[in-house]
Image (tube, helix red, strand yellow):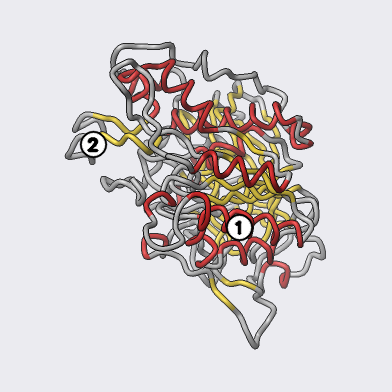
Amino acid sequence: MLRHFIISLCVATSSVAAFGGVNLPATFTTDRPMGLYNEDQGYGLDFTNSPVMGSILNGQAKTLPNEPIYYSVNVPDGNYRITLVLGSKKRAAETWVRAESRRLMVEGCKTKRGELRTVSFVVNKRNTIINAGNATAPQKVKIKPGEVGSLTWDDKLTLEFCGKAPAVQSITIEPDTTAVTLFLCGNSTVVDQGREPWASWGQMFPRWFNDKVCVANYGESGLTATSFLAQLRLDKILSELKKGDYVFCEFGHNDEKEKGPGRGAWYHYSVALKTFVDRVRERGGNVIFCTPTQRRSFKKDGTLNNTHGDFPAAMKAVAERENVPYIDLNASTKTLFETMGENGCRNLLVHYPAGTFPWQEKAFADNTHFNPFGAYEISKLIVMGLKELQSPLTQYIVSDWKDFSPANPDIKPTSDILPAPEVQQFFPWPESIFNDNRKPDGN
C-alpha cells in the first residue's frame, strides 16, 4: 500500500487548463496504491508492472527495487520546476533522479534514517509540434524513425528514481518561465541516449547547474548541422527560446560524411553554422560552439589521428568571424584520450566484452560513442570550457563542482580496459530498464 506519498501538482493559476485539460487537482494526496499511468488520468507510475512499486520510494516497502521506478505526468511543452523531498523516516536512502531519456538531475543523494532533504531542478519537456497555438499552420519536427515513441518527444514529463535505495516523500511539479534555458544541438555525442549502455555529454550536463538553469537537449544520433536544420529542430527551439537563452552547437562527426557539390567544411558546413548564429541572435539568444569530440583512433606513437579533417578549424573560423564563443572540445578530448592511452580510454567508450550485461550477446567495441562514465567526464570538459570563456553561465554552476583537467581524469591512465564494476567505483551509474544492442546512428 502506498501511503503518505504526496504529489503536489502546482500551477500558476490553479487551473487544470495549465496542464492541458488533464484533471489534476492542485494538491493530490493518496491513501491507496497509486495507479499506473493512463491517458485519462494523466499521471501515475509508468513502465512498471505493479502500482505498489511506489511504496518503495517512500520507504514503506521491506524490499528494495532491482530496477528504477518511473513517474509520469501529461503536461504541455515547456520548462517545469521539480521539487522533491528525498529520504525516509524508516531507513537510510540513496536516490538518483533522472528525467525524460536518462537525463541526470540528482546524483546519489544520500540521507540517513529519518533525514529528509529537499532538492529542486528544472526539466524541459517537449513534443514534436511547432507553434501549437497556430491552428491553421501547425508544423512538426521531422524526427527519425528510431525516435518515435521515445521519452524525448512524447506528451509526458517522466521522472526516474533509481539507485541502491531510492526514497521520495513528495514531488512538486510547477511551470517555470524564469530559468535560463540551454538548448543543445548536435549528434550522437550530444543527444540524451535513451538506452543503456550508450550515453552522451548532453544528458550529464544538467548535473552541473542549479535550478536557475534548464537544459533542453535537441541532439540526435546521425545528424549533421544541415540535417538538424532541415528537420526543423532549430525551428522548434526558436519557438520556445526566450531572450537571453543559450544555444550550444556541436557538429562535425557526421558532416564530414556528406559528399557532393558544395559539401565540405568550408562551405556547406560553415554556411549551416552561420545560419544557426543568425537565426538564434535574431530571437535574442546566445550561441556557443563546441568543436567535435575525438574518436578513438591512435597512431603508433600514441597520439590521435585527426579523423575530423578541417571541420574543427572551420567551426573555429566561423566562431571568430561571427564573434561566437567556442569550446574546443576537440582539443580537450584529444588530451583526455591520449592521457588515458589507446587501451585505457576504452573505459570512456562503449567497449564491453560479451555478457557484461545480462541482455548483451555480442561484444561492444565502439570507438565513437561514450558509456555513462565517459559522458560524465566529457560533460565536465564543457563546464571547464565555460569557465575558460568566463561565461555568465558559470554563476549557475552547482556548489559541489570541482574543477576538472583532461590531463588528470578520474580514472588514472591504465594499460587495459577495466571491468565494469571497477569503473562503477568512480561513477556508480544505476542502469535503466531500457537497453539496446545496436550502435547509435553516426558511428
Give the labeled residue for mark 1.
Answer: 125
Residue 319 occupies quadrant: top right
| Residue at point 68%, 41% (across, down) | 320
Name, please, the residue furthest toward the bottom. Answer: 136
| Left or right side of 111 for 377 | left
Vertical position of residue 378 compared to residue 151: above or below: above
Q: Is any atom of residue 34 visible in this view? A: no
| Residue at point 66%, 54% (across, down) | 29
Going from N to C along the chain, the mark reached first, 1 or 2, is 1
Q: How far apart are marks 1 and 2 (CA)?
A: 32 Å
Label at residue 264: none
Vertical position of residue 348 compared to residue 436: above or below: above
Give the labeled residue for mark 2.
Answer: 358
| Spot occupied by residue 439 in the image (x, y as percentages of width and height) | 30, 46
The 10 Å Cα crowd at callout 1, few under 14, some 14 to 19, many 20 or more, is many
Vertical position of residue 352 compared to residue 269: above or below: above
The 10 Å Cα crowd at callout 2, few under 14, some 14 to 19, many 20 or more, is few
